[in-house]
Amino acid sequence: MSIVLLAQSKKYFSILNLDFVMKIQKKSLLTALCLGVFATAPLFAQDVQSALRDLESERFAKAEQSFKQLASSSPSADNQFYLGYYYLKANQPDQAKAAFEKGLQADPKNHLNNVGLAGVALAKNDLATAQAKIDEAVKATKGKNMDVLLRAGEMYTMFEKNDPARALSLLDMAAKLDKKNTNNDIKMIMGDAYMIKNDGGNAVSRYEDVLMAKPNTAEANYKIGKVYLRGKNYKLAQDFYKKAIDSDPEFAPTYRDLAEAFFGSRVYKSAASNMDLYLQKSQNTDPEMILRSAQFDFLAQDYQKAISKLDQLKGKVNNPVIDRMYGWAYSALGKNDQAIETLNRFISTAPEKVIYDDYKYLGRAYGQAGTPEGDSLSIVYLEKAAPEDTTENLYREIGQKFYGDKRYDRAVTYFEKTIANDKEPKNNDYYYLGLSSFLQAFRSANELKSDTAAARQARTTYLQKSDQAFDKVIQNTPEFATAHFYKGQINYFMNSPSEALANGAPAPHYEKFIELANNEIAADANKKAQYQRNLITAYKFLGGYHMAKKDEAKGKEYLSKVLELDPNDKDAKQALEGPKAAPAPAAKPKAPAKKTT
């Protein structure tokens, strides 16, 4: 039977904080039983404690079986209370009510079952009835029954509509009856009440009291970890969860919350593996837990495993978030048609739940579909997601798409947004901004189809953007040869060819490029092909520049290097050979001699 916990009805992505059963003192069974039943009483008590340990460890199916069997074989007031207590923890208040009423029928003076009925009222947000039932039980026992006070206090900590102040008042009364200060359940539940009040200091102090009395209590270490988890101190939470596991490796809730702590630290593979351990040790088949586990698998990039878990939920839960998770996983696996189908279905059926990640993965799926319509829709959805994304900077992804499509003006816009929206822009962001701006400088002039003032201004604007971007690249990575090459190119095209040869503005940048490129080629000959074309461009300019300065030897040196790279380069050949002498004029043919007669 699948058990849906009360706390698991919260938002899918919230950290689940489930407070389960505290340790219960052994109570003797009915004292008026015959001798034959007395012989079995220790066995029943042992079975109750075993079932409670299973409930504490969230082995719900096993605990349910044990409590039902106990109530069936010996329908005592105590056993009916334990069965009802289980149903309360399982968020089945109607079944709990039936069990508590049977307990009262078995023994009207067993006021634990009245306390249980108060818990049923609290589960249904009926605070007035709950208070009346608890007051009745406390009054009937004259405030002297420690178990009644303990469980009454606990009831006020178990549900969404809780009352930690009333809980602490009742628990203080119970503590005064504990003359030897040996009841760790009182301390533990006090800690729970303080945690509900967001009083982490006092909560930790009560759990530490438990550890003082009984060192290495897994539940106490686990709950201290929970305090730190709520405070987002993930490292300290992890430390206490590991202590809890060392104390009791079978206490399943620890693995679930340790998974959440790793999730908070973005250590997703550890989050996924610990959630798997939780499901394994608790044998929990609750759909919300499986869904949460699938999320961790996705974040750990185990997409197929995430899909396998989602497949387990088909027909078991009507939660549109499943379509979201399918869509994300399909998108990551490149199953674009399935991703588009499931994400569009999710967005249309649960628009109030849509977050930017839904648009991100839908945009990626459309982008990978490889169709003109898909490319267009990809940009639409990525743009919707980009303003909210604080982890990946989707403006970068959009810029790369426009650059790949040779839409350099749009690429410039989005690389500028990338840099503006990133605390630590990447060097590649500046590089692609510089490259896109450089290429768009000539695209703009061509689009204007004229050498007008507007065309020249557009080209100058983009070249200036490119110049500034490559300055940043060089500042970050001074040994990046290609950045120096583009600085040379920009300085060449910012002038007319004759001005560039006259002022030599590109020269130092080309020289630096040649130095760095040749260093790389010396270390790896395979890089010669990578740099060949740009080296030829740089050598040609420097050859022409030195020729214009009347340094013929230096000019020929550079032009010779062009021919080393490309022996058939006509420009270098012609410059080295110099102007050819004009051919001598052909001799005029002599006029034929006149004949004499």
Image (spheres, rainbow, N blue to C red):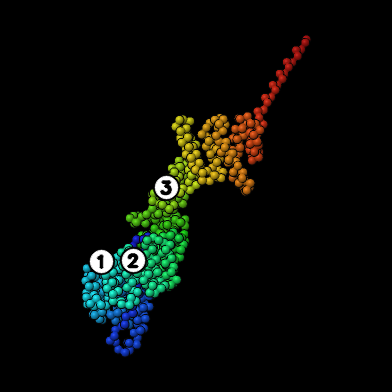
**So how many labels did they put on this image?**
3
Where is residue 117, by image quadrant? bottom left
Q: Which residue is mark 1?
A: 125
Pointer 1 or 2: first along the chain: 1
Pointer 1 or 3: first along the chain: 1
Residue sticking out furthest to the front:
180
Q: Amino acid at mark 2?
A: Asn
User: What crowding class fits label 1: few (fewer than 14 Cα within 10 Å), some (14-19), or many (20 or more)?
Assistant: some
Measured from the top left, where is residue 374 in percent x and y?
43, 49
In front of the other: 193 or 573:
193
For the question of whether residue 418 can be seen, the reply is yes
Q: Amino acid at mark 3?
A: Asn
Measured from the top left, where is residue 429 in percent x and y?
48, 46
Looking at the image, residue 31 sits to the left or right of residue 267; the answer is: left
Q: Which residue is mark 2?
A: 202
The Cα atoms of the two marked residues, 3 and 2, are separated by 42 Å
The Cα atoms of the two marked residues, 1 and 2, are separated by 27 Å
Q: Is residue 33 above or below residue 249?
A: below
In front of the other: 172 or 26:
172
Q: Which residue is mark 3?
A: 421
Instruction: Give me the residue at 40% from left, 69% from top.
Output: 221
Q: Amino acid at mark 1?
A: Asn
Instruction: Give me the residue at 63% from left, 33% from top.
Output: 555
Q: Check whether the beta carbons of the residues at disc 3 and disc 2 lie within 8 A of each other.
A: no
The local secondary structure at tag 3 comes to loop
